[in-house]
Image (cartoon, rainbow, N blue to C red):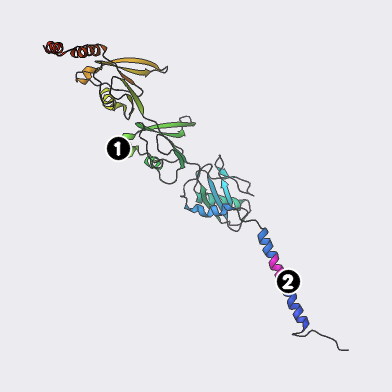
Amino acid sequence: MTRLSPHPGTWFERLLLIMNTIRCLIGAAVAAFAALAQPPPPAVYNTIENASNLPMQKIGADDLIGITVYDAPELSRAVRVAADGTIRLPMLKQRIRAAGFLPADIETAISAALSKEEIMVEPVVSVSIVEYRSRPISVVGAVRRPLTFQAMGSLTLLDALSRAEGLTDGAGPEILVSRVQPGPDGRPATLVQRISILRLITAADPELNLRLEGGEEVRVPDAGRIFVVGNIKKPGTFPIKDSSESSVLKALAFSEGLLPYAADSAYIYRQEGALGRKNEIQIELKKIMERKSPDVVLLANDILYIPDNKTRRSTMNVLEKALGIGGGLGGALIYTMGR
């Protein structure tokens, strides 16, 4: 009886080849399923990579920073700076102070902490800015697009107004810039600066174009208004851009002048005092018109009232009726008036 033995090219070699092929296919399938089952990397790493476009400046509370530790993905993450200005990383016992430092300073601090606590030997750390939130600037009031944005890089008051698309037609004579600064006792205090729009924009005074660093509120109040009523051609309200330039004659010009039966005297009703009491101020309108008396300045919310001269109106009504009776009588009246 002849005994079978393995031989190249025989059925035994072919069987081994088939078994190796099946083993490779099974290994590839297991690796593919393992790759599919592994969760995708957090989106924060993409955010960290894209954060390099933000300008490097000192970090503050509530900013979001991206930390990458080479060969240590469990330590790489995005961290929000706490209100006390610190951040915390896993496995580190101590908190790292971040507020007031540049990203390069935080890289050094994290590397030192990892080495000191014997977590890593000579760690390589990279820190980038993902989002700024510590330097908000608000522009509100009489602007075309009120908004709040983060101060990044060099920024001035005119830059902030430009982002708000400029002032509206009803903007007042001043801009109020509020900042929170340490007071004499060390406690936070709000400092308000008043900036003249006329000097800032029209006169282009560079000293008034303040440099903004974040944390400011730029408020543009509405212009005050004066109210003109009574015996005028166009009653209404008119804005006051500058109180030093608002007067009775200008109010009459806005109102297109007086009607024929306006009285010689007018009245200004002005609210004064904390209780809002209205004071009545009489002015000699006829003398102002004839340049025999100086023009009177009007303040915001003043009411200029030009009453009717009832005596003159009654007299003219009588004359008009008399002149309409007949040519003879009318001619005599005209002749008498002419004399």
Farthest residue, direction right = 1
Q: Which mark is residue 122?
A: none
* Closer to us: 79 or 314: 314
Instruction: Please report the bounds of the magenta region as a residue range.
Output: 24-29
Identify which residue is drawn at 71% across, 68% down: 27
Image side of residue 43 versus residue 58, left or right: right
Residue position marked by numbered label 1 in the rendering: 202
State which quarter of the image contains the C terminus: top left
Q: Is residue 17 magenta?
A: no
Image side of residue 56 versus residue 328, left or right: right
Q: Is residue 163 above or below residue 296?
A: below
Q: Which mark is residue 23?
A: 2
Q: Residue 141 placed where, x, y %? A: 42, 33
The kind of residue on which mark 1 rests is Thr
Q: Which image quarter: residue 251?
A: top left
Residues under labels 1 and 2: Cα distance?
A: 83 Å
Q: Residue 119 placed where, x, y %? A: 63, 53
Mark 1: few/some/many CA within 10 Å (<14, 14-19, 20+): few
Q: Residue 268 placed where, x, y %? A: 31, 18
Q: Secondary structure at mark 1?
A: helix
